[in-house]
Amino acid sequence: MGDTQQKKDRLITPKEAAERLAVSPLTIKKWMRDGKIKGTKLMSVWRISEEEVDKLVKNEGDSN
């Protein structure tokens, strides 16, 4: 399995996503509600694919 496929399949917590994006976990949850980033609810916990976080990083970098 390639690195891209692994990132697409790997799910991280909103806290981990927040650390990578240098924002608070509450901001991540707000962005999920607003549709800025896609999340998946598994039972009672939210997860975000690494690919979604990477897309957001790339988009933020392109806008600077």
Image: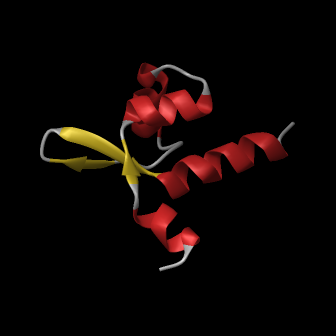
User: What color scheme is it?
Assistant: secondary structure
Q: Residue at x 47, y 67 (%)?
A: 6
The residue sitting at the bottom extreme is 1
Q: Residue at x 83, y 47 (%)?
A: 62
In the depicted structure, whether residue 19 falls above or below residue 12: above
In the depicted structure, whether residue 20 falls above or below residue 49: above
Residue 54 in picture, x, y percent from top left: 61, 51
Task: Judge from the rendering whether residue 61 lies leftward or rightward of residue 14; answer left or right.
Answer: right
Q: Residue at x 36, y 38 (%)?
A: 13
Q: Residue at x 37, y 52 (%)?
A: 11
Residue 26 in picture, x, y percent from top left: 42, 21
**Total numbered labels:** 0
The residue sitting at the left extreme is 43
Residue 52 in picture, x, y percent from top left: 52, 53
Nearer to us in this view, 35 or 6? 6
- Which quadrant holds residue 9? bottom left
Task: Judge from the rendering whether residue 44 lies leftward or rightward of residue 35; answer left or right.
Answer: left
In the depicted structure, whether residue 51 falls above or below residue 48: below
Quadrant location of the C terminus in the rendered image? top right
In the depicted structure, whether residue 9 falls above or below residue 31: below
